[in-house]
Amino acid sequence: MALNLNLSLLRPWHDHAQRGMKIPYVTAYCSAKKELRYIAAEHVIDTHNATTQLIAHQVQSFHPNSLIIEAPSEGSGVMPKWFYEYASHGIGEVAYALDLAIRNNINCVTGEPSQLQIIDGLEQQEFTKEDFLSWHICSMLKHRYKYKTLDTDNIEGAIQEFRKNLLRQIPIAESNCNKLNFYNWYHEKLHTSFHIEHLASLDGSPSKNNTSNYLQKIMQAIDNVREPNIVNTIHQQLQSNDKVLVIYGAAHEFKHKIVLQNLMSQHTITSLNP
């Protein structure tokens, strides 16, 4: 039986708070001989938590043929070589899942589009490479600040580190985002001078309305590229595998739920924690 994908059923991010489920949890779907389980993960920075326990339990009990994870992409589900090395000693649920897949000889792909696909999608929505690079720097600064791993006395060094790491993946060297250019971009787009405390306080969730800040508008444009790519990857993996396990952040699971309910004939939601 063919599985028909309807991308028009994707839900926007701003509805995800209504999901009413304590994360992490698993949604289980089946259709004919196909089974899909979707772990709505809590993003973590260690490997000893409820999310990684749930991943291990599902791998051991469900015996998936394929894992789909929220990892960097070179396109078509392929992860860059450096991420495999990182996963072998990295932390967090994504690295943990990839390492577990390797050790159990399970096919593992990412659901993410490549950075070039994201840039192409942003440009189609009238954003620029500089917007993407500056948004990336803001996201990394916010992340480091949140987890207290940012040297606030060396913002310049952090900016150059994030720029260099991104340029390893995509050729956008013409966007010469040094500290001065970044600060000018920040002032122009967010209507205030850069301060890490101000950036940390900004809502960066996907949104595009009259009250959305510029980071939210970029994030919404990125979501317009990411979310169809993720569910298309799920669809593709179900074509060639009988049991597929998806491990993505809980907000994604909520956005994808109706698409997957329509794709598969039956579904149940349960925490399925060991």
Image (cartoon, rainbow, N blue to C red):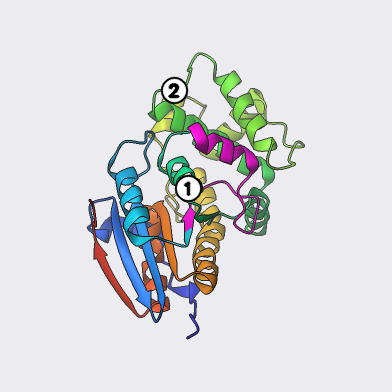
Q: Can residue 236 be seen by looking at this rendering?
A: yes
Label 1: how many Cα within 10 Å (few below 14, some 14–19, many 20+): many
Instruction: State whether residue 22 is above or below residue 84.
Output: below
Residue occupying the point 49% across, 76% down: 5
- Spot the residue most to the bottom: 1
Q: Quadrant of residue 46?
A: top left
The magenta-colored residue range is 67-89
Q: Nearer the viewer, residue 213 or 240?
A: 240
Residue 74 picture location, percent across and down:
65, 50
Residue to which mark 1 is pinned: 216
Q: Quadrant of residue 168?
A: top right
Q: Nearer the viewer, residue 127 or 67?
A: 67
Magenta region includes residue 84: yes
Q: Nearer the viewer, residue 79 or 260?
A: 79
The residue tagged with tag 2: helix, strand or loop?
loop
Residue occupying the point 22% across, 58% down: 20
Q: The residue under label 1 is which amino acid type?
A: Gln
Label 2: how many Cα within 10 Å (few below 14, some 14–19, many 20+): few
Please indicate whether residue 244 sits to the left or right of residue 160 in the image: left
Please indicate whether residue 256 sits to the left or right of residue 50 in the image: right
Q: Which mark is residue 149?
A: 2
Sequence order check: which comes first, mark 2 or mark 1?
A: 2
The residue tagged with tag 1: helix, strand or loop?
helix
Residue 38 picture location, percent across and down:
37, 60
Q: The residue under label 2 is which amino acid type?
A: Thr
Q: What is the tally of numbered marks visible in this picture?
A: 2
Residue 123 picture location, percent across and down:
67, 54
